[in-house]
Amino acid sequence: MMLSYMAIIVIALLFLFIGANKFIDGAVIVARRLGMSSLMVGVVIIGFGTSTPEIIVSSLAALDNSPGIALGNAYGSNIVNIAFIIGITAIISPIIVQRKVIIIEMPILLITAIISLILMYNGSLSRAGASLLLLLFVAYMSYTFIQSSRASTKSIMTPMAETPTHSDENKHSLIKPILILLIGLIAMMIGAKGFVFGASSLAKLWGVSDLIIGLTIVSIGTSLPELFSSIVAATKRQHDMALGNIIGSNIFNTLVVVGIAGVINPIQAIDPMIIRRDIPVMLGFSLLLLIFALSFKKEYRISRIEGVIFLILYIAYLMLLSKTL
């Protein structure tokens, strides 16, 4: 029985991984043809796109009345994204950080985490609280698109009269990447459904809490798209995409993944360890990311040594989790 569940998880991971690749391929082509910046592509398209497995997994877990997996997946993925993925990415290629990311995106990441902690501090997440998280995401997206459109207006001045057929050509050229994007999304939905079933079944079989499974197996599995896209972006010197991917993904997880899970099924009894251990760890890692980016360097960047420190801290966190098994 155990081998069957593990096989389901492996197959589900393949669907998630392949689906995420297709999703990213299609989304990046669409974004580029619409004239979006590389940071915008990283934060919005890749960051939010690679979080699609998290939102599907947490939504299905909420419907299954498994709040531990729903919340553990969201916050566990955030911890994996910063400590594990940024750690590995920085070791492969130190990540150069834009000033805009330090003064805007990173503080927003910290603020959203603090707000989610406040909303759940009493041990529950109401539908109203979850809706507030979603409204904050809408506000963040509105701000992001306004800033992006201003930047595009300044940098791209193409007379429309000279290219009368450009719009029609662009519409036709978007059909194929949108189809690829949809195929990827369907594959991720199939993978996510299998993952929730396999992970929750293993949790019951081993007598391990849903929260621990969500924080480890599920969060690492659903973070594979972020890992793949960040490493590829870093090796191609697309630092904006590599870091924007992680920051965008974490903001999305905190506001949308948790928000939708709470709207679908308000969480009445949150595991105290999420509030006492996991969200503070996520906040600590987010703050450390900001400190590393700023600290005593000629340019804002995450160095290889800092990448190693993140990996060591992540291993320490896993050891802390193992004590609660």
Image (spheres, rainbow, N blue to C red):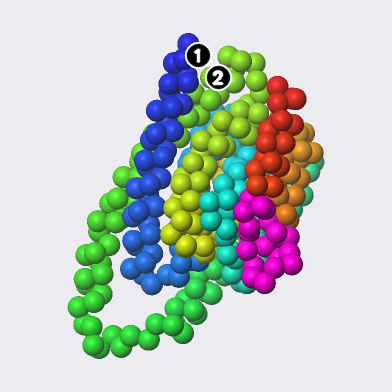
Q: Which residues are magenta?
A: 289-307
From this viewpoint, is residue 74 visible? no
Q: Is residue 291 magenta?
A: yes
The residue under label 1 is 2
Residue 10 in the magenta stretch? The answer is: no
Is tag 1's residue or tag 2's residue first in the polypeptide sequence? 1
From the top left corner, tell me how far across and down residue 263 is, in percent.
Answer: 59, 43
Q: Residue at horizontal 36%, vertical 70%?
A: 34
Q: As drawn, is 16 to the left or to the right of 291? A: left
Neighbourhood count class around disc 2 (C-alpha, 10 Å): few under 14, some 14–19, many 20 upward: many
Q: Which residue is mark 2?
A: 202
Horizontal side of 325 relative to 248 (left or right) equals right
Whether 37 is drawn above or below 211: the answer is below
Residue 204: percent from the left, percent from the top?
59, 17
Q: Residue at x 64, y 67 (%)?
A: 300
Of helix, strand and loop, which one carries label 2? helix
Residue drawn 68% across and 56% down? Answer: 289
Query: Residue at the top extreme?
Result: 1
